[in-house]
């Protein structure tokens, strides 16, 4: 026997009875759900009956954290996330979270258990490079956020009464000081890039001068380029390439979809590179793997670079030429720094970098604005009154 019982506004209880256990007690399965109306609740009841009959239903009292992740959260929640996000979540779950709490029953996980788990991540552990160190602050923070999010879903689905992560203190993440290249340093970098392969030169300069994120630049195709107006359209990002699968998403935010105008000298070299690109594709013939996609920056046969490849090349280049070490992403910040130095307005920088609003730009580059305030004061030194003869 199966039926739906209305419990409250938008809340229903599913009840399925059938047979008796070894003691002669009638077996009853119940499940509380959220539904818009009785008809939707009946649909969920049919699914509930199917799960019970197929033997795939696990009652909340017996469900382990591992069961919840693999049978509920993954197929009913994570499946709606971007493929790249799913990959990252699964990586962290398999490497850090499931080994610690996967065996625990979902309803028995306590706050103090999670406090202890998060504390373990602060202790030194052996890494692949042979060094013994705790997990980075950023990794600890990511684990915290993922655990909180997963258990919050379990709470919303009424599998647990409270989220036990609510009492766990969020790991502290020290904000690293932003390192950038200023005008003269950037000019030296571009000069050194003249001795490097053209595809890498154009990719790096595109990030430095165009203020593009790594994944945005790698995802650019020839159809995004307008040579007549010297503009490049930024409308997608490659976040990962794994086992032949390219994880392509929309840029970080809606405001990140933008048009970036590039200098004439850059566009001229890009036009020369396009001729080389077309020749390379023609020579590849049937071996070309890019299909109809025309990724400008690819590792061969039309397959775009893995984002990590750009970072590795950049790090080797910096070391090879003895430049100040900054992250690949800091090339984007350097672009803002140079624009500040050249007197660009905050609004102009906001639009070029694709920030949602001007306050985001101001907050991100507050140290640069402070530097500029100091520089402005220095420019006024010429107004200092000249001392008269005999004055101290």
Image (spheres, rainbow, N blue to C red):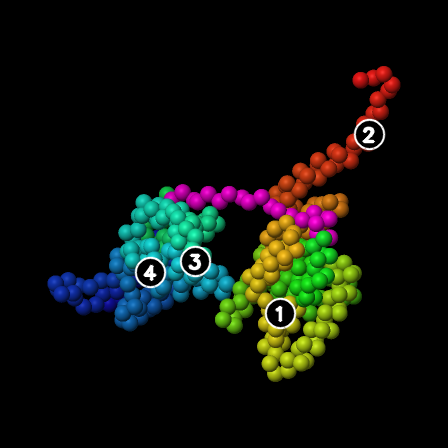
* Left or right of 354 on screen, residue 58: left
Q: Nearer the viewer, mark 3 or mark 1?
A: 3
Asked whether the viewer can see residue 107, the reply is yes
Q: Quadrant of the N terminus?
A: bottom left
Disc 1 marks which residue?
Answer: 298
Disc 3 marks which residue?
Answer: 128
The reply to whether the C-beta atoms of the residues labelled 2 and 4 are less than 8 Å apart is no
Kind of element beneath mark 1: loop
Q: Quadrant of the C terminus?
A: top right
Q: Residue at x 40, y 59 (%)?
A: 95
Q: Is residue 172 magenta?
A: yes
Between the C-alphas of marks 3 and 4, the distance is 26 Å
Marker disc for residue 383: 2
Between the C-alphas of marks 1 and 4, the distance is 39 Å
* Left or right of 81 on screen, residue 350: right
Kind of element beneath mark 2: helix
Q: Residue furthest left?
A: 23
Q: Nearer the viewer, mark 1 or mark 4?
A: 1
Kind of element beneath mark 4: helix
Q: Residue at x 38, y 47 (%)?
A: 123
Q: Residue at x 28, y 51 (%)?
A: 108
Disc 4 marks which residue?
Answer: 66
Magenta span:
168-187
Q: Earlier in the sequence, mark 1 or mark 4?
A: 4
Kind of element beneath mark 3: loop
Q: Nearer the viewer, residue 296 or 29?
A: 296
Which secondary structure is most common in the magenta stretch? loop
Between the C-alphas of marks 1 and 2, the distance is 55 Å
Asked whether the viewer can see residue 156, the reply is no
């Amino acid at each position: 026997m199966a039926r739906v019982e209305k419990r409250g506004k938008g809340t229903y209880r599913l009840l399925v009875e059938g047979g008796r256990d070894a003691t002669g007690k009638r077996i009853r399965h119940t499940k509380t759900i959220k539904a818009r109306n009785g008809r939707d609740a009946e649909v969920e009841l049919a699914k509930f009956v199917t799960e019970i009959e197929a033997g795939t239903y696990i009652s909340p009292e017996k469900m382990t954290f591992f069961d919840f992740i693999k049978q509920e959260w993954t197929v009913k929640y994570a499946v709606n996330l971007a493929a790249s996000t799913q990959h990252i979540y699964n990586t962290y779950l398999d490497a850090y979270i499931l080994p610690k709490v996967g065996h625990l029953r979902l309803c028995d996980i306590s706050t103090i258990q999670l406090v202890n788990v998060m504390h373990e991540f602060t202790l030194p552990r052996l890494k692949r490079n042979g060094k013994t160190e705790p997990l980075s602050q950023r990794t600890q923070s990511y684990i915290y956020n993922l655990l909180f999010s997963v258990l919050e879903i379990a709470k919303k689905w009424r599998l647990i009464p409270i989220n036990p992560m609510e009492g766990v203190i969020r790991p502290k993440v020290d904000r690293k000081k932003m390192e950038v290249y200023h005008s003269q340093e950037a000019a030296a970098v571009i000069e050194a890039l003249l001795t490097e392969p053209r595809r890498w030169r154009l990719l790096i300069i595109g990030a430095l001068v165009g203020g593009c994120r790594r994944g945005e630049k790698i995802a650019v195709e020839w159809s995004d380029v307008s040579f007549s107006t010297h503009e490049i359209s930024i409308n997608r990002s490659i976040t990962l390439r794994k086992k032949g699968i390219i994880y392509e998403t929309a840029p970080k935010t809606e405001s990140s979809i933008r048009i970036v105008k590039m200098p004439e000298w850059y566009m001229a070299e890009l036009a020369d590179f396009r001729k080389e690109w077309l020749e390379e594709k023609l020579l590849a013939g049937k071996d070309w793997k890019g299909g109809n996609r025309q990724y400008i920056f690819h590792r061969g046969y039309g397959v775009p670079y893995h984002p990590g490849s750009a970072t590795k090349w950049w790090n080797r280049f910096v070391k090879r030429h003895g430049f100040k070490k900054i992250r690949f992403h800091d090339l984007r910040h350097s672009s803002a720094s140079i624009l500040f130095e050249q007197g660009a307005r905050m609004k102009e920088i906001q639009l070029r970098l694709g920030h949602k609003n001007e306050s985001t730009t101001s907050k991100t580059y507050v140290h640069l604005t402070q530097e500029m305030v100091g520089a402005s004061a220095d420019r006024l030194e010429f107004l200092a009154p000249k001392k008269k003869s005999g004055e101290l």
